Image (cartoon, helix red, strand yellow):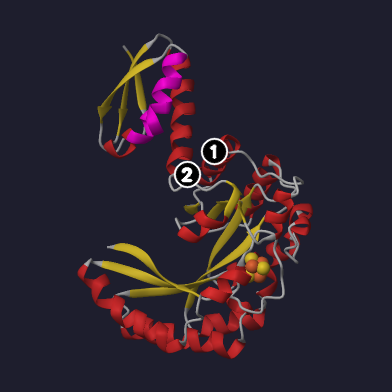
Amino acid sequence: MRQTNISVFVPHSGCPHRCTFCDQRSISGTQKAPSADDVRKLLDEQADTLRKNDMRAEIAFFGGSFTGIDREYMISLLEAAHEFTEKFPDVYCGIRCSTRPDFTDEETLDILHRYGMTAVELGAQSMNDDVLRLNERGHTAGDVEKAAKLIKQYGFSLGLQMMTGLYGDKPEYCIETARRFISLKADTVRIYPAVILDGTRLGELYRSGVFTSFSFEETVGLCSQLLRMFDEAKIPVIRMGLHASREVEEKMLGGVYHPALREIAESRIFFEDMLEEMKRLGGTEFEVHTDPANVSKIIGQKKENRIRLEKLGYRFNIKNEKGTRLKIYAL
Ligand code: SF4
C-alpha cells in the first residue's frame, strides 16, 4: 500500500521572525488559515479517494511554525486530525507537522503526543551559527540539537530540513550541516536550495549586489554529495527543492529552482560512479546493466552523462537488469 501526505498549509500570521528567505508576509495575506472544520471537510473528502487508490496518508500540517501559532487554534486543528486517525485508521496513519527548533519544548511536545502526532520536522536550515545569524533565523544550531534530541526522546519521527546557498553560506557549511543531521539520527531530511524571492531580505541583498546564491552547477554538485551522505547513513531525503509553484516562478529573482533538481542530482551521482568504474575497468566500450527505472538518470538530462563520457572517450550501451543499480562490463 502506497503512502502519501494530505497537506494542510497553516500560515504563521503574526510570526515575530523575519528570516531573510521568507515571504510569509505576502503568503499570509493570500492564504487563508484553515479552520478545524475545513480540515475535517478535507479529510472526509480525501478518505474515499485514498481508499480507491489503495493508499494511506499522514495528515501533514505544513507552513513552517505549527507549534508557534495560537495555542487554542493549534489544538483545534490537532483535534480535527486526531478525530480522523481514530475514525479511519485504515486510511490516516499519522499526523506530522513542521516547526521551528525554538518552538519545541516539553510542554508543546506533550500536547502533540496527546493528539497522536507521529512526526515532527524542524526547519533547521543550517547548523552554522553565522549563517543562521546572517539570515535572521533567531535560533542557533544548539537550539536545533536540543529540539531534535527532545523529539527523539518523545518517540516522534524526526525530520530535519536544510537550505543551501543562504546569505553567508558555503558548500562546506552545508556538508557540515548534513554531518550533524546524521549524528542527530534524523529519520527524514528535506533539502531546499535557496530561492531568492522578490519582497524578501534576500531579495534586497541580491538587488544591492551584496549576495548571490550558489550557481546551478554548484548546487547540483553539492546536492549530489548530500544525497550520497544521507543515502550512506540510510536517511531518506523525502524532498529536494521547492514544489513547482506559479507564485515562486513569478517572484523569483535568483537562486536555484528546478522541478527536476533531484533527478539531475541523482544523475550526477550515476555519472561519477560510471566514470570511476570505467576508469578502473579500462577500455573505451562498455555495457551498463541497470534497472529500467534508472535509465534516464544514467543517460542524463539532454543526454548530458552520455555526452560528457563520450568526450572523455567512454562509450556505452545499456542493458535492462531489473533490481540492479549499476553494473558495468568492458566490451
Ligand atoms: S520562515 Fe521565519 S519568518 Fe517565515 S514564518 Fe517561518 S519563522 Fe517566520
In-front residue for pair 262/31: 31
User: Looking at the image, which residue is at 45% across and 28% down?
Assistant: 271
Answer above or below: position of 293 versus 24: above
Answer above or below: position of 84 versus 214: below
Q: Is residue 101 magenta?
A: no
Quarter of the picture containing the N terminus is: bottom left
User: Looking at the image, which residue is at 48% across and 33% down?
Assistant: 268
Quarter of the picture containing the C terminus is: top left
Q: Position of residue 312 (x, y in %)?
A: 47, 14
Report the span colored magenta. 296-311
Is residue 269 something one can see in this rendering?
yes
Tell me if 327 is positioned left or right of 121 in this view.
Answer: left
Mark 1, Cα crowd under 10 Å, few <14 / some 14-19 / many 20+, is: many
Q: Is tag 2's residue or tag 1's residue first in the polypeptide sequence?
A: 1
Badge 1 marks a residue whose secondary structure is helix
Q: Residue 261 bears which disc, if any?
A: 2
Q: Position of residue 152 (x, y in %)?
A: 59, 67
Q: Main secondary structure of the magenta part?
A: helix
Q: Residue 220 bears which disc, if any?
A: 1
